Amino acid sequence: MKQQPRLTVVIPTYHRADNLKRIVPSITKHGFVRQVIVWNNGHEKVGWAQKSDRVLFVDSNVCVWGRYLAALRHTDNDWIGTQDDDYILTNWPEIYETAIANPTQIVSAMHAAPNQQSGIQPVGLGWEAMLGWGAVFHRSWIMPTFNPYLRQYGEDDVLHNEADRLFTILRGERHVEVKAHANPLPGAGGPTAMHKQDGQRRRIGIARCRAIELLKRAKNL
């Protein structure tokens, strides 16, 4: 019987150490999780006394881009899971099983807006999904997907903040969606949330425009 792959789950965080004390055990309790990497974008330490050889803490402020650097630099695991630091996810088993059944596509847990059937939306020739409510993808997809952006724009502020948006659009394919089961923790949707930070709307627009143009170029359109 073929052994099922196990996940390395990456959590970027910013000054939410108390949330992490609840989030990390909610992930490591699952047998399909091999490792959790906490990528600390803040200036305070986020480790705590109950450390484990399954939990790694990395300090470097590169915002969402830290998800991908962690996957590239700090694990040799092939399958990467992601979530944010302001929710407890209660359906990780469903996300994992869906990823096993769809090994060539990003699997993302999403909330659809009231007037939408899907949380994953078309953007140019690609599809945009958020990866903070639980997602799984293969580590080998990271650099081929980001290389066109890095060659054109380098590792800039838009990449740091909008890496998930760029990654999902630049894949150039429809992703697999499951319904997010996410219970909010302190800070969720509050003034420290990323989407409420200065300049974030501008960065979102730039990321979408750049991804659309790069995909057109890749497809010779």
Image (spheres, rainbow, N blue to C red):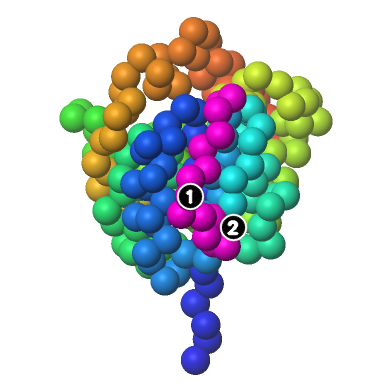
Residue 79 point in image, percent of width and height: 56, 61
Q: Is residue 53 magenta?
A: yes
Residue lying furthest right = 151
**Which of the image's four quarters has the C terminus?**
top right
Can the viewer see residue 38?
A: yes
| Residue depicted at x 49% and y 77% | 4
Residue 154 point in image, percent of width and height: 77, 26
Apparent side of residue 153 relative to residue 137 in the rendered image (left or right): right
Amino acid, disc 2: His
| Residue depicted at x 29% and y 56% | 91
Q: Which mark is residue 174?
A: none
* Quadrant in the rendering for residue 85: top left
Apparent side of residue 113 relative to residue 6 in the rendered image (left or right): left
| SS of the residue under disc 2 | strand
Neighbour tally class for label 2: few under 14, some 14-19, many 20 plus, Cα within 10 Å:
some
Answer with mark 2 or mark 1, whichever residue precedes in sequence: 1
Residue 122 point in image, percent of width and height: 43, 34
| SS of the residue under disc 1 | loop
Q: Are marks 2 and 1 in contact (CB under 8 Å)?
A: no
Amino acid, disc 1: Ala
Q: What segment carries the magenta color?
A: 42-55
Q: Which residue is mark 2?
A: 138
Q: Is residue 69 magenta?
A: no
Q: Which mark is residue 49?
A: 1
Apparent side of residue 81 relative to residue 92 in the rendered image (left or right): right
Residue lying furthest bottom = 1
